[in-house]
Image (spheres, grey):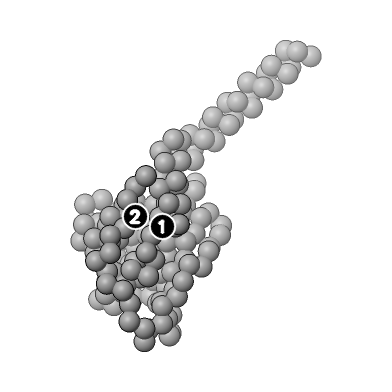
Amino acid sequence: MKTLLKIVGVLFVLTVGVVFVLLGGPQSLYLFYHFQYLVKTNNHRAVVSAAIPVMRTTTDEMMFIGDSLAELPSLIAEMEPKYVFVSPDYMVMEFHGGFNHFGFRIDNQKTQWKISWYTEGSHHFLLSVGKDEQVASPNVVAAPRQ
């Protein structure tokens, strides 16, 4: 019986380890904590303000990743997303993909811009900015990494 319990225990530990590695390991934890810090401290109105001109000038779908992130407004690039997907209808700033997606999404709606944050399987509304509202200057710097 003790041998069986030891085998089950070892299999459990191995399973937990494999799942942790598949979810990205320690790097994923770091990225998630950085993302949660941005959710709590970033000036989301300024992020929307920085995103609006990019979305308005995009005529098709575009992806910014790696070095091309520098082509985006500095406020968005300084948030350090893994990639940014832009279309005239929405912008997605993703910080982690694979088995555990999380990031921000800005939607171009009829009368407003709406920003939300998401994790795998859930979306959380942050704020909306009316299209007739004056938005803050996009020069506001993103919250620094902790």
Residue drawn at point x = 37 percent, y = 64 percent: 43
Q: Position of residue 32 (x, y in %)?
A: 45, 47
Looking at the picture, does residue 134 appear above or below residue 67?
A: below
Q: Secondary structure at mark 1?
A: helix
Q: CA distance from mark 2 to mark 1?
A: 6 Å
Please name the amino acid that badge 1 sits on: Thr
Q: Can residue 58 be seen from the camera position used here?
A: no
Q: Residue furthest right?
A: 1
Q: Which residue is mark 2?
A: 143
Residue 54, quarter of picture: bottom left
Q: Which residue is mark 1?
A: 41
Nearest the camera: 112 or 18? 112
Q: Earlier in the sequence, mark 2 or mark 1?
A: 1
Q: Which mark is residue 1?
A: none
**Which quadrant: the C terminus?**
top left
**Which quadrant: the N terminus?**
top right
Residue drawn at point x = 40 percent, y = 69 percent: 106
Say if mark 2 contacts mark 1, CB within 8 Å: yes
Residue drawn at point x = 34 percent, y = 66 percent: 47
